[in-house]
Image (cartoon, coloured by chain):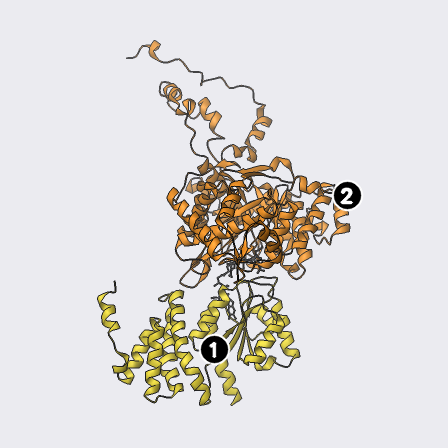
Chain colours: A yellow, B orange
């Protein structure tokens, strides 16, 4: 059964920890992918009158940064990273409405889908889950996504980022169909268009007029954070 | 001292050489295809069995549970039309459930062997039991370019050239579309027709095409009929298999591929399903669980095909793939990949199904040592297990993304050696060789010119085309080439010379009249500037 170490760790009563200890414990709990504990910790900090923006930044986002680094370095494996993303989501579920109330800027929002004619979704799912792990709100349109479905979702959710995935040479060009439609509807400049999938490359990204091509999900998170930040800086 | 009389007289083995046609006869005897006596098409595997009989029964029982209680999602209208009247059930959640008795019944009844025809009957073979044939397999999107040694998108002429290479490689028995002709990615009708045309232009071995449009199957039949010269001619000797992935793991039908599978069943064309769940991502991380799901998914295809037509021919394709759980990426070459694929073969063989199995899917980007061991490991495992059609991916590198012609040649040698290994050791009175040993010990003291050696040297031993067995000094004197360089020279030689006229000019004209053929006639002749 549970080892000695775990038992003592499970004995930790979050509510009894001082703020800085709690934040540190939450970083560990995020790393261990403990969704219930993260929800609890988030609530405790809010009850101690921390603003939702401060909880997000100090307890969650900064905790997740190390996850990205350790994933890249091969210390964390993908199933573990997805557990951390899940824990992050549990915290975000509490914070998101509160962030909206105070008008604080959320980390960002992304609509993602595999393009028409293509059913490959493992990479798309990974990219989506990793983005959630970084605090983004992700609306997943699934596979075989038609241009009109993208447009409807974009109008409804008003995301910062549109993510498209394609694994087939036959379906990749559909990304351009979507981008052209965004242009003709005057929506292109409101969005960061991010594309991915095994057969894509930078040259193709340029040819279709997407903003960024990401080789893998971890890169996608880094680039997304950076690009959303830059856009906001320009906007203000 | 021994008396002269005690020395045994030369046995019947020590015959005088007989006339064998002098130099010309010997050249013929040495011809490459004679080596097929050593590692040949149709050799029988089945000795490697990673699962116990009880394991097989438990995997089987659980797979039937899966089909009965979880079922397959997203059945297409065509499937429902065929399957519901025959006993499958559509549940409220929209999933098609397969009653166990129905599955068991189909398993007992499906054809256990069938002919695999080739355009040239000399390459026909019979798929049955655990007899092994090898083929190229698809569908990469790039080629490691011969001149630049950089990856570039693959094209129609690459498919034609790959077919011409296959035609000349004795240990690759069938040509399954290895690439996409990427320049026609947006014109799939043109694409599919031209892939078939390029294949038939380059090889007379059995071919396989992948399409995701059911109506293209009919068009392809039209093309093949023109090729054989009479309407309905193709279906009498269907030398082309259609292949694809009708299942999207976990346990859903993929619409387009399913429509293709249904159409093939209706027309009586051989169909190869590749059910390729990735352990840990789209099937359980437990390899046994992956086998359960993969078996269930392939059984669903088998049942559907059989319900459409009781003599439908499905090449049962359990293709269990592996995820690298550090990144979630697909991985083709590993001990686990070899093991789980061999176990899949064992499942298929236990039920005596004609099956295909992938191997040789290295993750290395070039034909390096990693590629060498990954390819040999997975291919040896499935060959020893006795998979009928080894989709051995000769030359394919980069986790199925690219192909190298040099690699095809290197893998041809590897495949020959593996077939040799699978063939095993013939033990009988003759081969036990008591007399030969006696002859030699009391005679010349060596076996090098013994009649038995002469008799067996081309059937007991395989002589690879490329592997370097010279002394190191000799190797250094010739510039210290590695196997890749040796393969480069040979590729050029093979592709510069072999322009078979498999499609006769009048037939070609008729085909070009009816179909949008894009392969330039000049590309099918020497002096095209490519080689
Ligand atoms: C698994 C797989 C399948 C599974 C898919 C299961 C599923 N639920 O997704 C099945 C078996 C169903 C399948 C079916 C087919 N497949 Co497939 N498949 C693959 C395979 C082996 C691995 C793909 C994969 O999941 N990789 C793992 C994930 C994690 O990697 P990834 O997708 O690249 O994603 C990463 C990055 O690219 C990036 N990323 C991906 N998307 C996005 C999106 C954004 C926004 C961002 C930022 C990043 C990002 O981040 C991810 C994580 O790091 C590839 C080969 C390969 N090496 O890629 C072939 C491959 C892509 N398939 C291929 C083919 C041909 C097919 C079929 C057409 C076969 C057929 N004839 O039926 C059908 C497709 C039918 C259809 N209409 O789509 C070819 C492509 C040929 C082509 N024309 O381009 C390939 C290359 C294999 C081959 N050589 O044949 N396939």
Q: SS at mark 2? A: helix
Residue drawn at x 57%, y 39% as measured from the top left: B114
Of marks 1 and 2, the one in the foreground = 1
Residue marked by disc 2: B506
Note whether B161 is above or below A1 in the view shown: above
Residue drawn at x 46%, y 36% as measured from the top left: B420
- Relative placement, left or right, of A133 versus A118 is left
Give residue A234's position: percent from left, percent from top: 52, 87
- Relative placement, left or right, of B458 versus B3 is right
Q: SS at mark 1? A: strand
Question: Residue A116: which quarter of the image?
Answer: bottom right
Note whether B81 is above or below A125 in the view shown: above
Which chain does the numbered disc 2 sit on? B
- Residue A137: mark: 1
Note whether B370 is above or below A27 in the view shown: above
Depth check: give the residue in front, B390 or B520: B390
Depth check: give the residue in front, B6 or B108: B108
Q: Residues within 10 Å of mark 1 (few under 14, many from 20)?
A: many
């Amino acid at each position: 059964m549970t080892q000695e170490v775990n038992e003592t760790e499970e004995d930790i009563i979050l509510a009894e920890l001082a703020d800085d200890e709690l934040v540190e414990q939450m970083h560990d709990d995020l790393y261990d992918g403990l969704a219930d504990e993260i929800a609890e910790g988030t609530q405790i900090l809010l009850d101690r009158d921390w603003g939702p923006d401060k909880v997000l930044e100090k307890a969650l986002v900064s905790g997740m940064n190390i996850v990205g680094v350790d994933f890249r370095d091969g210390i964390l494996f993908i199933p573990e990273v997805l557990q951390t993303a899940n824990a992050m989501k549990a915290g975000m579920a509490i914070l998101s409405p509160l962030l909206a109330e105070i008008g604080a800027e959320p980390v960002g929002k992304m609509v993602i889908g595999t393009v028409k004619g293509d059913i490959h979704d493992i990479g798309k799912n990974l990219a989506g889950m990793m983005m959630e792990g970084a605090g983004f709100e992700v609306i997943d349109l699934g596979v075989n996504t038609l241009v009109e479905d993208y447009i409807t979702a974009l109008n409804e959710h008003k995301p910062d980022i549109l993510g498209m995935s394609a694994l087939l040479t036959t379906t990749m060009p559909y990304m351009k169909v979507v981008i052209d439609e965004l242009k003709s509807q005057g929506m292109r400049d409101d969005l960061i268009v991010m594309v991915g999938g095994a057969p894509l490359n930078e040259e193709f990204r340029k040819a279709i007029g997407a903003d960024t091509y990401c080789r893998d999900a971890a890169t996608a998170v880094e680039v997304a954070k950076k690009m959303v930040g830059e856009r906001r800086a320009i906007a203000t | 001292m021994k008396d002269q009389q005690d020395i045994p007289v030369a046995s019947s083995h020590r015959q005088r050489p007989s006339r064998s046609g002098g130099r010309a006869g010997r050249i013929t005897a040495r011809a490459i295809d004679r080596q097929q006596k050593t590692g040949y098409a149709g050799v029988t595997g089945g000795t490697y069995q990673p699962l116990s009989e009880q394991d097989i029964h438990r995997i089987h029982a659980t797979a039937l549970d899966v089909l009965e209680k979880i079922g397959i999602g997203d059945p297409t209208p065509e499937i429902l039309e065929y399957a519901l009247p025959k006993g499958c059930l559509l549940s409220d959640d929209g999933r098609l459930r397969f009653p166990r008795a129905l599955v068991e019944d189909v398993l007992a009844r499906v054809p256990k062997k069938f002919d695999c025809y080739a355009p040239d009957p000399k390459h026909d073979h019979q798929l049955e039991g655990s007899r092994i044939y090898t083929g190229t397999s698809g569908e990469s999107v790039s080629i490691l370019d011969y001149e630049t040694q950089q990856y570039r998108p693959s094209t129609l002429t690459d498919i034609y050239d790959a077919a011409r290479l296959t035609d000349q490689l004795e240990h690759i028995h069938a040509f399954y579309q290895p690439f996409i002709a990427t320049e026609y990615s947006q014109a799939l009708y043109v694409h599919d027709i031209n892939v078939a045309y390029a294949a038939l232009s380059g090889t007379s071995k059995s071919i396989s095409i992948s399409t995701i449009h059911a109506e293209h199957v009919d068009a392809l039949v039209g093309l093949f009929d023109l090729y054989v010269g009479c309407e309905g001619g193709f279906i009498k000797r269907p030398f082309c298999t259609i292949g694809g992935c009708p299942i999207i793991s976990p346990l859903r039908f993929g619409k387009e591929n399913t429509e293709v599978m249904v159409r093939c069943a209706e027309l009586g064309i051989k169909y190869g399903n590749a059910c390729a769940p990735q352990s840990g991502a789209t099937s359980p991380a437990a390899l046994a669980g992956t086998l359960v799901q993969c078996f269930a998914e392939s059984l669903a295809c088998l049942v559907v095909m059989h319900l459409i037509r009781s003599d439908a021919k499905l090449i049962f394709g359990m293709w269990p793939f592996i995820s690298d759980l550090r990144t979630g990426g697909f991985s083709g070459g590993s001990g686990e990949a070899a093991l789980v694929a061999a176990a899949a073969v064992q499942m298929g063989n236990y039920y005596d199904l004609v099956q295909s199995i992938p191997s040789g899917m290295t993750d290395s980007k070039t034909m390096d040592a990693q590629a060498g061991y990954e390819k040999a490991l997975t291919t040896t495992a499935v060959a020893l297990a006795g998979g009928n059609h080894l989709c051995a991916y000769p030359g394919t590198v980069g986790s199925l993304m690219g192909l190298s012609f040099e690699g095809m040649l290197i893998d041809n040698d590897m495949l020959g050696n593996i077939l040799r290994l699978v063939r095993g050791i013939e033990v009988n009175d003759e081969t036990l060789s008591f007399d030969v040993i006696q002859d030699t010990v009391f005679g010349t003291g060596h076996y090098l010119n013994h009649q038995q050696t002469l008799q067996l040297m081309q059937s007991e031993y395989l002589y690879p085309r490329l592997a370097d067995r010279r002394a190191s000094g000799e190797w250094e004197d010739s510039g210290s080439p590695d196997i890749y360089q040796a393969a480069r020279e040979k590729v050029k030689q093979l592709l510069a010379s072999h322009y078979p006229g498999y499609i006769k000019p009048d037939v070609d004209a008729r085909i070009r009249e009816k179909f949008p053929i894009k392969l330039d006639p000049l590309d099918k002749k020497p002096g095209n500037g490519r080689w």
